[in-house]
Amino acid sequence: MNTLLALSGAFGVGSAFAYFFEPERGRRRRSLARGQAKRVVHAVNDAFEITSHDVRNRLVGSAASLRSRVRHESCQDRCLTATRRSWARVSLGLRRMQREPPK
């Protein structure tokens, strides 16, 4: 059984060697295989980056949710105060711009 497995493995390696190192089309086949390998590596890297970004965002969101439960503070109050403050800055800035004469 081991002899048959070794023989079939040697046959496969020899066939691949002959396929990729053929004088006429071997260069093109090697180039295509290299391009496909690069494409797969880039796809795996992209998938890893997307997944790690998603996991990070989910963890940050979970931590914020837990923090808000522990603080016993309403997010709406903080958000409303910040929104009112920013709205006041914008509206006051627009009023100043309207009052100033153009230069």
Image (cartoon, rainbow, N blue to C red):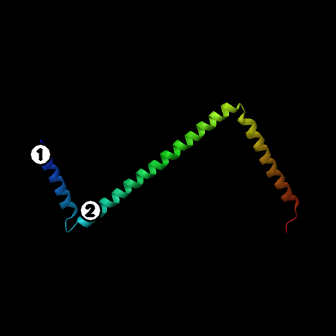
Q: In the image, what residue occupies the spot 84% across and 52% down?
A: 92
Q: In the image, what residue occupies the spot 34% across and 60% down?
A: 35
Front in this rendered view, residue 6 or 23: 6
The reply, left or right, for residue 97 in relation to residue 69 is right
Query: Secondary structure under badge 2?
Result: helix
Q: In the image, what residue occupies the spot 14% across and 48% down?
A: 6
The reply, left or right, for residue 56 in relation to residue 89 is left
Query: Secondary structure under badge 1?
Result: helix
Q: Nearer the viewer, mark 1 or mark 2?
A: 1
Q: Which amino acid does label 2 sit on?
A: Arg
The quarter in which the C terminus is drawn is: bottom right
- Rendered image: mark on residue 53: none
- Rendered image: mark on residue 4: 1
Q: Which amino acid does label 1 sit on?
A: Leu
Whether pointer 1 and pointer 2 mark residues with C-beta atoms closer than 8 Å, the reply is: no
First in sequence: mark 1 vs mark 2? 1
Q: Name the residue under label 2.
A: 29
The quarter in which the N terminus is drawn is: top left
Tell me which corner region of the image, top left, top right, bottom left or bottom right, holds residue 14.
bottom left
